[in-house]
Image (spheres, rainbow, N blue to C red):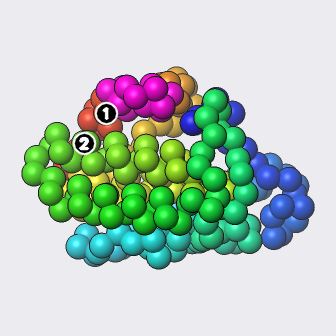
Amino acid sequence: MIEDNTNWTPLPDDNLLGLSDKNLINEYEAKGIAAAEFFVIQLDTEAIITSSLILEIHNIAFRELYDWAGKWRTTRIIVGQLEPPEPMQVPQLMYQFIDNLNYKIKTAKDKNDHIDCLVYAHYEFVRIHPFNNGNGRTGRILMNLVALKFGYQPLELYYREGDSRKIYISAMKSADNGDFEPLRNLIAKELLPF
C-alpha cells in the first residue's frame, strides 16, 4: 500500500489557492492537520466513530486547499505495489470498517486488545484509501482518536526526519503481506497512558 514517496503534493492548479510553492502548500496542509488533531482532542471520548465524523476530520484538515476535502475518493489510484479498492466500493467498505472498528473498541478489554484495535484502525483505513489524498495523515488522526478513547496519548508513528519513516513504511509493507507484527510493535512502543 505504501511507497517511499508518499508525500505527494498536487499540482498548483489542483489547489484552491493556486499555490505553486511546495513549502507553502506543506505549510497550509500542516496547519489543516493541526486543526483536525485539535478537533479530535476536543471530542467527547464517548463519541461514536461515524462516516460523518471521518469526513469532517478530513474536511477540517484539507478544506483550505482542496475541493476534494471531506469527500470519498471518486478516482482510481495506485499506492505502491497495491491498488486500493475501486472508488464505487469506498462508501460500503468504510461503513463496514466503521462498524468493525466500533465493535472492536466496545469489546476491547486490555492493552493487547487496544493495540490490535489501533493496528486495525490505522492499517485498514489506509488499505481502503477512502480519500484522494491525505489518507495516511487522516488514518493517524483516526488511530489517535481511538487511542484517546482508550486513555492513551496520541501517537506519532513516524517523524519526517531520520529512519522512523522508513521503519513505518516497512511495517506497513509487512502488513500488506499479512505480517502485522512490525506495525503492532511500532504502536506498542509508543503507547503511553494519559
- Is 99 displayed left or right of 165 in the figure? left
> What residue is pinned by disc 2?
115
How many marks on residues? 2
Q: Given the current orientation, which residue lies at the most extreme left position?
A: 109
Amino acid of disc 1: Arg
Could you say whether the residue bearing mark 2 is in a helix, strand or loop?
Answer: helix
- Is 69 displayed left or right of 186 in the figure? right
Q: Which mark is residue 184?
A: 1
Magenta region, residue range: 171-183
Q: Is residue 113 magenta?
A: no
Could you say whether the residue bearing mark 1 is in a helix, strand or loop?
Answer: helix
> Residue 4 falls in which quadrant of the image?
top right
Q: 161 above or below 54?
A: above
Give the position of the C terminus as an image quadrant: bottom left
Q: Are marks 2 and 1 in contact (CB under 8 Å)?
A: yes
Amino acid of disc 2: Ile
Instruction: Report if residue 76 is visible in the image.
Output: yes
